Amino acid sequence: MIKRLFKVGSTVVRKIVGKTKKSQSLLKAIPSEELFCHKYWKMAAESGKLNSNGRKSVELSEYLHSINHHLIKSPYPKMINEIQPQIGLTPRQIITKTDLDFRRLVPTEEDMHVYRCIGEKPEFFSEYPLYQKALNVKKGDVIMMREYAYAAETEAYSKNFLANNRGILYDIEVPKGSRISRAGDVVFPRSSRFECLDTKDIITADENYKLVKLRYLT
């Protein structure tokens, strides 16, 4: 098992594997976080190691809001390695554990529609450039949400997150067989990709937002 996992890693680790038993024992001291990359996940999935854990939600879903800025553009990058007192883990450890949890969730049993709102961002906000980029999405575009993106099962609830009824409303089609977290809120894995199916400006006496229809790409 250890030899196979480390073939995905660095050449230095591969050389250690071929040496003495004493050298091989050093492998156990190497943090498992070093193995968490896309190549490893692909290999693990193909070998059947990511079997379902019987859960429909990731264990730390309620804490992901607080670390999402690390996945977009954190003003304090060093804090990704600082312990979060409420759970005794660093943001990096939370990300590592949550990535594994997502890949072991029970897949959705049927097609779903969920809704996600992004409130309008004033020009002086640091998120303004990203918000403007999201506003300019067009049919056929594929977008990536680098954070653990939260959504709701009803449009009405999601609209609570529109600032003064202005912003972006994502209507997201989630195909059967998707591994998303479902426990009150819906949460997508980080760096999830979505195809834009259509866009429409919704302007009424009380609302002014952009409706963007997406399909989740599993």
Image (spheres, rainbow, N blue to C red):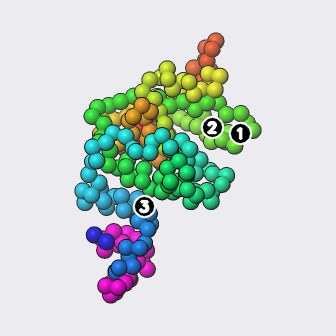
Q: Residues within 10 Å of mark 3 (few under 14, many from 20)?
A: few
Q: In the rendered image of this protein, does residue 114 appear above or below residue 89?
A: above
Residue beneath disc 2: 131
**Residue where numbered disc 3 is placed:** 37
Q: Earlier in the sequence, mark 1 or mark 2?
A: 1
Q: How much space separates mark 3 and mark 2, taking CA atoms?
A: 28 Å
Q: Where is residue 154 in the image (x, y as percent from the top left)?
A: 44, 23
User: Secondary structure under badge 1?
Assistant: loop
Residue displayed at 31% across by 42% down: 55
Q: Which amino acid does label 1 sit on?
A: Phe
Q: What stretch is highlighted in magenta?
A: 3-23
Residue 203, quarter of the rendered image: top right
Q: How far apart are marks 1 and 2 (CA)?
A: 10 Å
- Direction from residue 99 to residue 133 in the image, left or right: right
Q: Which corner quadrant holds the N terminus?
A: bottom left
Report whether residue 183 is seen: yes
Element on which disc 3 rests? loop
Viewer-proximal residue, 130 or 179? 179
Can residue 8 be found in the magenta stretch? yes
Q: Position of residue 124 (x, y in %)?
A: 75, 38
The correct choice, above or below, for 135 with respect to 20 in the image is above
Query: x, y percentage for residue 115?
Result: 47, 29
Name, please, the residue furthest toward the left: 48
Percent position of residue 131, x then y? 63, 37
Look at the numbered discs 1 and 2 and tell me whether their residues touch, using CB distance below 8 Å. yes
Position above or below: 139 against 89: above
| Circle 2 SS class | helix
Q: Earlier in the sequence, mark 3 or mark 1?
A: 3
Residue assigned mark 1: 125
